[in-house]
Amino acid sequence: DRFTSGLVVFARSHPAAIELRRQFKERTPERIYLAVAEGRVGPERGRLTHSLGENPKSLKIHVVAKESEGRPASLRYRVLERFPHATLLEVALETGRRNQIRVQLAAERHPIVGDFSYGHPSPLIPRVALHAHRLGFDSPRGRKRLLFESPVPEDFKRLLTKLKGGASVAPPPDGASLLRKEDEHAGIGKKVVRAPKRGDLRVARKPEQRHAGKVPRERR
């Protein structure tokens, strides 16, 4: 997820990549997230299971009714703290589907605060309130267990402070924002510009620049 904070793992060699891919396929790594969900999430602990599919046009992930039309996704959660309008959750992934936590919580009518794709933007935080907090896996070179933790970022802490004070997660009718300058994310609101194809670059050149290095021939 583009605006999810926290940990990410990269392999520095091909053998390491193969070993890490095997571990994730067998679902042995520990993947713990912190998520702020809208509303009051029911039980103190729970397990969510859904079948997820991908829209072929928009490429968005969604819950499908028939299991045969999607891929199984499951997670476990426990409530860490409750606020008047939201709930802080610790989420442990059992599978690793794209946007899984966001989609599954939204399917339970508890979208993550600030999720503009599966919920709605929030005046409290300019991104998805989702943080990859802890990651554990076996070292690719041996069987030593590696465990990494990422501290909660400042914008996430400020969100929790606002929620403790009773702030609402819903956008205000007048469109006002409770964000401060330090809460603003540089990537939010900017259009993603994809690299043009090579043929497009040729067309985009000015006529006088196409053969700048060539001497024009004299016509006879």
Image (cartoon, rainbow, N blue to C red):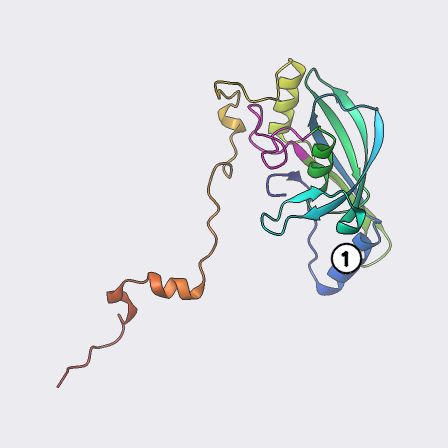
Q: Residues within 10 Å of mark 1 (few under 14, many from 20)?
A: few
Residue at horizontal 58 percent and vertical 27 percent from the top: 125
Residue 48 shown left or right of residue 168 in the figure: right
- Confirm whether residue 35 shows in the render: yes
Residue at horizontal 65 percent and vertical 18 percent from the top: 163
| Viewer-closest of 108 and 214 | 108
Dominant SS in magenta: loop
Disc 1 on helix, strand or loop?
A: helix
Q: How many marks?
A: 1
- Magenta part of the chain: 111-130
Residue 48 shown left or right of residue 207 in the figure: right
Relative image position of residue 68 (x, y in whole percent) = 79, 51
| Viewer-closest of 75 and 179 | 75
What kind of residue is marked 1? Arg
Relative image position of residue 15 (x, y in whole percent) = 75, 64
Q: Quadrant of the C terminus?
A: bottom left
**Residue 116 found in image quarter:** top right
- Confirm whether residue 132 shows in the render: no
Residue that protrudes farthest toward the left in the picture = 220
Q: Is residue 220 above or below residue 46?
A: below
Relative image position of residue 80 (x, y in whole percent) = 78, 24
The residue pinned by badge 1 equals 21
Look at the image and say whether residue 5 sits in the magenta stretch: no
